[in-house]
């Protein structure tokens, strides 16, 4: 594999963003570090993370755009690295955590719960999360994390409705 500096500028941008600003290059637990990075990255969305129109529509547009970008970037990075779902590709964890935080208050108990549940689901991969990894290219890389994020979001909202959070 070539050194980062040997790639053309456009390919370098793909690698920077797909690796979560190089978080994916951490040799251990890169997905965990990417999820930690997702917390401050989500913060600017807090004002639109409410269940009311048009703010919720803005959040949906941002999440859809991030998910589409993650699929494209992941597929391009996978081709560049020449390996299936490289541990260096972590934009999927960032997109998944953003889904996990939909309409969840940006307070530490909820953030910690979302982080722990999301990481557990991303590692354990219950059905149909594991099966979604069979999708081709960037779709297989990102879809499992989006599903883990959706499961996490449902669980955190359930915990909040039960008064646990």
Image (spheres, rainbow, N blue to C red):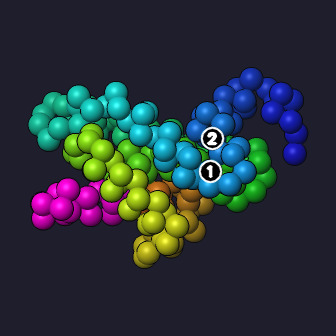
Q: Residue 92 appears at what percent x and percent y?
A: 52, 49
Say which quadrant the N terminus sits in: top right
**Span of residues in magenta:** 149-165
Q: Is residue 160 above or below residue 70?
A: below
Q: Residue at x 41, y 59 (%)?
A: 116
Q: Residue 23 appears at what percent x and percent y?
A: 63, 41
The part of the image, by quadrant, that contains residue 8 is top right
Q: Secondary structure at mark 1?
A: helix
Q: Are marks 2 and 1 in contact (CB under 8 Å)?
A: yes
Q: Could you say which disc has been placed on residue 157 in the image?
A: none
The part of the image, by quadrant, that contains residue 136 is bottom right
Q: Which residue is mark 2?
A: 23
Say which of 162 and 46 sits in front. Answer: 162
Q: Residue at x 19, y 31 (%)?
A: 55
Q: Residue at x 29, y 56 (%)?
A: 153
Say which quadrant the C terminus sits in: bottom left
Q: CA distance from mark 2 to mark 1?
A: 6 Å
Say which of 142 and 28 sits in front. Answer: 28
Q: Could you say which disc has been placed on residue 30 in the image?
A: 1
Which label's residue is closer to the chain start, 2 or 1?
2
Say which of 148 and 78 sits in front. Answer: 148
Q: Residue 132 appears at what percent x and percent y?
A: 50, 67
**Is residue 12 toward the left or the right of residue 95 in the image?**
right
Q: Residue furthest top?
A: 9
Q: Is residue 153 magenta?
A: yes
Residue 68 seen from this side: no
**Is residue 135 toward the left or the right of residue 95 in the image?**
right
Q: Is residue 54 magenta?
A: no
**Is residue 81 toward the left or the right of residue 20 in the image?**
right
Q: Secondary structure at mark 2?
A: helix
Q: Is residue 62 above or below residue 35?
A: above
Q: Residue 98 appears at what percent x and percent y?
A: 38, 44
């Amino acid at each position: 594999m070539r050194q980062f500096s040997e790639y053309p500028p456009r390919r370098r941008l793909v690698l920077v963003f797909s690796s979560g600003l190089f978080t994916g290059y951490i040799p251990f637990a890169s997905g965990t570090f990417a999820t930690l990075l997702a917390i401050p990255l989500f913060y600017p969305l807090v004002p639109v993370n409410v269940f009311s129109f048009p703010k919720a529509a803005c959040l949906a547009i941002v999440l859809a755009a991030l998910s589409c970008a993650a699929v494209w970037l992941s597929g391009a990075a996978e081709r560049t690295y020449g390996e299936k779902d490289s541990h260096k590709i972590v934009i999927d964890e960032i997109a998944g955590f953003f889904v996990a935080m939909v309409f969840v208050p940006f307070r530490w108990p909820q953030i910690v719960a979302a982080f722990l549940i999301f990481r557990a689901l991303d590692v354990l991969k219950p059905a149909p999360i594991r099966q979604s990894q069979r999708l081709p290219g960037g779709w297989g890389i990102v879809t499992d994390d989006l599903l883990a994020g959706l499961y996490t979001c449902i669980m955190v909202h359930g915990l909040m409705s039960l008064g646990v959070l």
